[in-house]
Amino acid sequence: MENGGNHIKRCLIRACFTLPSDEQEWILEPLCFPEQPATDIGTNSSSHHDMEVVTCVLCSHSAPLSEKDRLLKHLVLVHKLVIADVKLIADFPKYMEYWKNRISEQPITDFCSVIKTNSQGPVEKQEHYFLLCDVLPEDRVLREHLQQKRLEEILEQQQRERDDDSFQRICMFCNDEFNGNRSSLLNHMAREHSFSVGLPDNIVYCVEFLDHLQSKLDNLQCLYCEKTFRDKTTLKDHMRKKQHRRINGNNSEYDCFYIINYLELGKTWEEVQSEDDREMEDEDDDWSDWQAHPVCAVCLFCEQQSESMEKIYTHMEETHGFDLHKLKTELNLRFYQQVKLVNYIRREIHQCRCYGCQEKFGSKPEVIRHVMEAGHVMQLPETSTWDQPQYYFPTYENDALLCALSDSDSESEHTGPWRDVPVIAEDISNLKVLKQTSVLSHLLKNTDSSS
């Protein structure tokens, strides 16, 4: 399997779980610095769909589809099974039903990659986890089949809505009532109220969409900035003056109402649109007004954020006495070791535990106060404590601080202790070298099967 190891590595990162350092505390999903919460693409708001019961692939345990996370937690805790990219599975109940039948016929190891945790620790503390992902051709075909079936259902639903002449609704912004086809109301809101949600033919589950928007307005919430106001008059004036008569395109709550989000497996409308744009050749394109979206790094010890990595480093050193550059130099930390160290510190602080002495506290402010007062800011435990494979995975999946890490400083690039060490790319055809050098050698078992 060409580049199979790298594909599995990416699936591991997207599998949305980190492994415990002890048996009592678990982080089953990567944390995330405050951001707009995501919703599953490909699910509508019908309550009967949410109440559909899903059964575990390895036992009789079951849960409603609306409590899918509880079932995924059961799979990890009880069966050590992780399903990668769950949010990209178009029909989760059908997916689980299929694999329940297949696993009843053959051993689970025939379908899953095996991951060994704490590989450098004592044998009694090592555990094996199973990863089910689309690296397996059978899984990939199943996901594509479910996606295609879902797309056919969505297109049929859209066609029914196009042909429906029984639509009846009052405009959200005035008292005009519209009967017949949904397009009359949507075109009215765009023309008379400058509120456009796109072409009617691009929308599906239109009634649910309008109900969702109406609910926000009833709760005195702006549809664009999503701030809440004290009364309808204030909300109306705000949306008019700020030109907020539009929906927030970054809010994924709306993804399930647009056909384009169902077209390609694992791609949102923004990704599909960007691919279409790249295919259009225009020699006169002017990129002078291009503005990159800023990425803010967050301090390890407080909520301080900055778009400049150097400012964050300076802040941590001056405010908290933490010098990551110094630790990197003194301990000769390579890139992946820096990644593991940052993830380890993030995780220990999140769990209200001092990373230096392992003392547990009741809250995050308490542990930060202890770290500062006890002088444990630059005190690290034995390397074997944090230099473990589970810390390859980010504690916060949008941790921009990880993007600022580097192998070496410019001034020591040619004089450091690693100047004579050859650098070998992981994407090479020599699998023996790959096994010896790749980080996957600590995580994957029986990698010969990918050759």
Image (cartoon, rainbow, N blue to C red):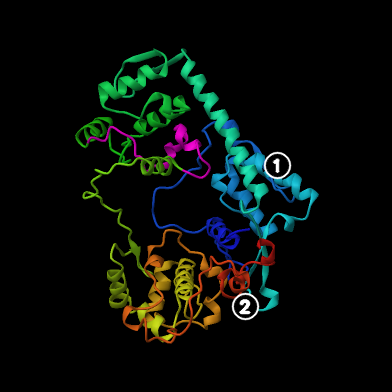
In the rendered image, the vertical position of residue 306 relative to residue 173, given as above or below: below
Which portion, as a residue range, is magenta?
243-267
Q: Which mark is residue 120?
A: 2
Residue found at the very far left of the displayed protein: 241
Q: Please give the name of the residue rendered at 45% of the width and 35% of the height, measured from the top-left corner.
A: 260
- Among the 4 quarters of the image, the one containing residue 188: top left
Is the residue under label 2 in contact with that under label 1 (CB below 8 Å)? no
Q: Position of residue 158 (x, y in %)?
A: 49, 24
Q: Which residue is mark 1?
A: 97
Q: Tell me the kind of residue under disc 2.
A: Gln
Q: Tell me the kind of residue under disc 1.
A: Glu
How packed mark 1 is, by other alpha carbons closer than 10 Å (few <14, some 14-19, many 20 or more), is some
In the rendered image, the vertical position of residue 107 relative to residue 266, given as above or below: below
Is 161 or 146 nearer to us in this picture?
A: 146
Q: Please give the name of the residue rendered at 55% of the width and 24% of the height, measured from the top-left corner.
A: 156
In the displayed structure image, the side of residue 31 where residue 329 appears, left or right: left
Q: Position of residue 92 (x, y in %)?
A: 62, 42
In the rendered image, the vertical position of residue 96 relative to residue 336, given as above or below: above
| Upstream in sequence: badge 1 or badge 2 | 1
Q: How many marks?
A: 2
**Residue 374 in sight from this viewpoint:** no
Q: Please give the name of the residue rendered at 70% of the width and 42% of the height, measured from the top-left corner.
A: 97
Disc 2 secondary structure class: loop
Q: Position of residue 424 (x, y in %)?
A: 51, 74
Image quarter in which the C terminus is found: bottom right
